[in-house]
Image (tube, grey):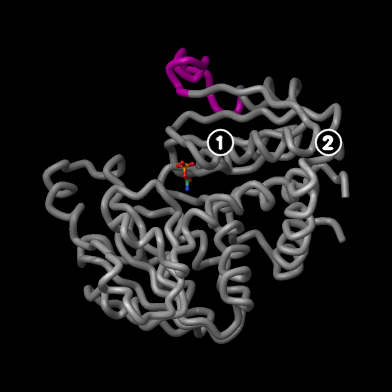
């Protein structure tokens, strides 16, 4: 069944039938990866436009396209593109959309992805728009939760750290709203609590959540999703310095616990490296899952499967 959308800018667009199809296709793409790839997207070009720093999202998109036999053109950094000369995102899309078959873009401004998609002549995928949305991260998070826990329905999900500016936790919470009997625990300092747009969504959908400052509340969950304090989003740097070391998860705290530890990465101290060796530390597997999930999305949006 085809996806219900041509462009992906927000997890709020996704239907349950979309996530079911993407998760199933991503599992098939894992088998393709075991064979080294295929030629499903031969002759197709992905434009990979990253106007904010990225390691995982950019490289996993580009890997995904190449593993399916496609090609990649790329632009990295506003200062090396004509956005620096004052070109609008809309004009960039009209032009790049005449070169490539599909576009993914990361941009520092919230709302830039919707503006891009509104004029883009080819499928467009939001790879992160400032503090807005990061829908492909949420999809790979969903795939990871399903792989690690064997289900999504009924789980207790804790999210900790910078819940105010962390676009990944916003996108993932909206996406998890498609599943049944979930309970959320939001762990943050009072300055970085989950924004109203997310808590209002949960109230409207009768999904229970609690808010606390205590990281210990996350240790009794099924999933503990840690996040970095987003230095780049703070207007006042002293505020960032005061809050950045609020939480630090280490192996001693996790002793005897079953909780699956996730993090979108990069981490900058909120998970000690001694956690990495634990079976329940899923964050590097999570990053790896970005490739099959993005392969699935590229193939489905290009209607190759
Ligand atoms: N998780 C994530 O978006 O990582 P990058 O910023 O490295 O792409």
Q: Which residue is mark 1?
A: 58
For residue 221, above or below residue 40: below
Point out residue 143 in the picture as x, y percentages from the top left corner.
Answer: 62, 63
Q: Which residue is mark 2?
A: 41
Q: Quadrant of the N terminus?
A: bottom right
Q: Residue shown at 50%/79% (left/top)?
A: 204
> Cα distance, mark 2 to mark 1?
18 Å
Ranked by sequence position, the earlier of labels 2 and 1 is: 2
Magenta span dominant secondary structure: loop
Q: Residue shown at 38%/68% (left/top)?
A: 159
For residue 82, above or below residue 282: above
For residue 278, above or below residue 66: below
Callout 1: CB less than 8 Å from ligand 1? yes
SS for dot 2 = loop
Point out residue 217 in the picture as x, y percentages from the top left corner.
Answer: 30, 80
**Part of the protein shown in magenta:** 77-91
Q: Is residue 214 magenta?
A: no
Q: Residue shown at 26%/52% (left/top)?
A: 269
Horizontally, residue 103 falls left or right of residue 303, namely left
Which of 236 and 24 lies nearest the eye of the viewer? 24
């Amino acid at each position: 069944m085809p996806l219900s959308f041509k462009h992906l800018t927000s997890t709020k667009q996704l239907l349950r039938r979309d996530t079911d199809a993407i998760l199933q296709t991503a599992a098939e793409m894992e088998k393709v990866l075991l064979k080294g790839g295929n030629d499903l997207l031969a002759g197709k070009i992905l434009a990979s436009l990253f106007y904010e720093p990225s390691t995982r999202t950019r490289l996993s998109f580009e890997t995904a396209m190449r593993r399916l036999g496609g090609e990649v053109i790329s632009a990295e950094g506003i200062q090396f593109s004509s956005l620096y000369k004052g070109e609008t995102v809309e004009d960039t899309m009209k032009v790049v959309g005449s070169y490539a078959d599909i576009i993914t873009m990361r941009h520092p401004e919230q709302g830039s992805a919707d503006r891009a998609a509104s004029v883009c002549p080819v499928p467009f995928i939001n790879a992160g728009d400032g503090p807005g949305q990061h829908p492909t991260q949420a999809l790979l998070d969903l795939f990871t939760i399903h792989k690690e826990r064997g289900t999504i329905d009924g789980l207790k999900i804790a999210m900790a750290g910078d819940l105010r500016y962390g676009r990944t936790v916003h996108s993932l919470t909206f996406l998890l709203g498609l599943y049944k009997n979930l309970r959320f625990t939001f762990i943050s300092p009072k300055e970085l609590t989950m924004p109203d747009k997310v808590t209002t969504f949960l109230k409207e959908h009768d999904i229970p959540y609690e808010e606390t400052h205590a990281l210990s509340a996350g240790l009794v969950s099924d999933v503990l999703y840690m996040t970095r304090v987003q230095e780049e989003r703070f207007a006042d740097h002293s505020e960032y310095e005061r809050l950045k070391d609020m939480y630090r998860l280490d192996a001693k705290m996790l002793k005897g616990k079953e909780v699956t530890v996730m993090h979108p990465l990069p981490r900058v101290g909120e998970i000690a490296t001694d956690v990495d060796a634990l079976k329940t530390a899923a964050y590097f597997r999570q990053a790896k899952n970005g490739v099959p999930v993005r392969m699935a999305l590229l193939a489905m949006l290009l209607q190759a499967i």
